Image (spheres, helix red, strand yellow):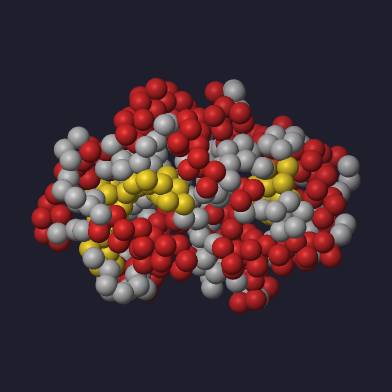
Amino acid sequence: MKLAFLAPEFYNSWGGVGIYSIELIKGLSKLDNLEIHVITPNIKQTNKKNKLKSIFNENVNIHTISNANDTFIYNLKFQAAVFKEFNKLNNKYKFDILHSANLVNMPDILLKFNKIEIPSLVTAHTTIKGQVKGFLKGNINPFKMASSEKLSLLAYPYISFLEYYYLKKTDNLITVSKKFGKLLKKEYKYKGKITTIYNSIDINHYNFNKIKEEDCISKFPFLKNINKPIILYAGRLISQKGIDIFIKSIKLLQDKGYNFHYIIAGKGNTNLLYNNLKENKIDKNNINYVGYIDNRNLVYLYRMSDIFTLPSYYENLPISLLEAMSMKSCCISTNVGAVDEVIDNNKNGILINPGDYKKLAENIIFLTENPEIIRKISKNAREKVLKNFRSDIMAKKTLDVYKNIVNNFN
């Protein structure tokens, strides 16, 4: 079988969709009788062929067709490039199936105007409607919104219309959670076939026992001098992800006299971040902003963190949560989207309501004062990931979907 995989973000990724794409392709490349063609934007790392060969095996072919980044305009360019180049590639390689990695990006939308003669499917991680709801809940002040959020808000009527059209033209969906599949049927009246295959991770990479403390300090030297509980936030610096809630909880803990160390990892508007920290009078000696850290190196921060926080206003099934759980960093997350399909409250993590920075701070205090509970929750979390969220499981289930679609294509 020959697979054409449209990846709006791939290697290096800047978000969950990129990580999903990488882990899926890595898993699929280990299976028999599958020739993989990844069609993706051209970024610096994608051109490093030797690096890519060390990650993917020889039956993964990468075709770069446009320049791209995490912006609305670049996504339009990728859509146009797919429309221009796909038929050329299809004529050359004779693909059996087309898989688009992300509903919101709609990479093959222009192909849907001219129906292609091969079966296709799309993975639905989120919707533009859900994203807009998320960052409006997180921040109604446009001056404090990230540029990507402002653009999404301005383009929302146009993109949401296209999204409805796109779904009507899509016969097969993979959703990364059960709850999201139900939402698509209810709110979007989706009539096609939905298969739920959970987001998953490489459990060998996210393995607490394989990474030593000295390895972490070698990667991040500032960790050497920290001798107090470490609280980690890893996510984009946008209101949807609840960065403001994390900072408010730091302020509350600081005012109560608790002495913790905080790490913020993620890309975004650093001026807004620093202004927020300054406005809340956060002690700069107790916090490190480390910028964007790719998932190969983020593992070291998970390893050293006592608690991982995910204070988002909107998620589906976040990969960062799986990564942290696999690394035995005790997780506190808002109960949004399908997070409760991962976290069993007080068993393998702790759930709080979105926006509740007081409860976030309260649970940080509780956990740091009860290290035996941290150990128990962290152990259970790793076991949950091992059982349900492994990338090899995701790959095998996805291949089964491909076979079923191809065999039933008229």
- Report the front residue among 230 and 195: 195
Q: How many marks?
A: 0
Name the residue at 71% across, 38% down. Answer: 353
306 left or right, relative to 19 = right
Residue 295 in the image, given as x and y percentages of width and height = 51, 60
Q: Quadrant of residue 154?
A: top left
Position of 400 relative to 162 (above/below)? below
Question: Foreground residue, 318 or 174?
Answer: 174
At horizontal 83% and vertical 57% (from top left) the residue drawn is 368
- Residue at the image point whose x is 59% and y is 58% from the top: 322
Spot occupied by residue 359 in the image (x, y as percentages of width and height)? 79, 41
Residue 48 in the image: state x and y as whole percent: 32, 65
List x then y, in percent, for residue 65. Answer: 23, 50
Q: Nearer the viewer, residue 96 or 152?
A: 96
Taking 303 as reference, is 225 left or right? right
Quadrant hosting residue 280: top right
On screen, residue 408 versus residue 308, left or right, reads left
Q: Is residue 83 visible?
A: yes
Taking 92 as reference, is 15 above or below it?
A: above
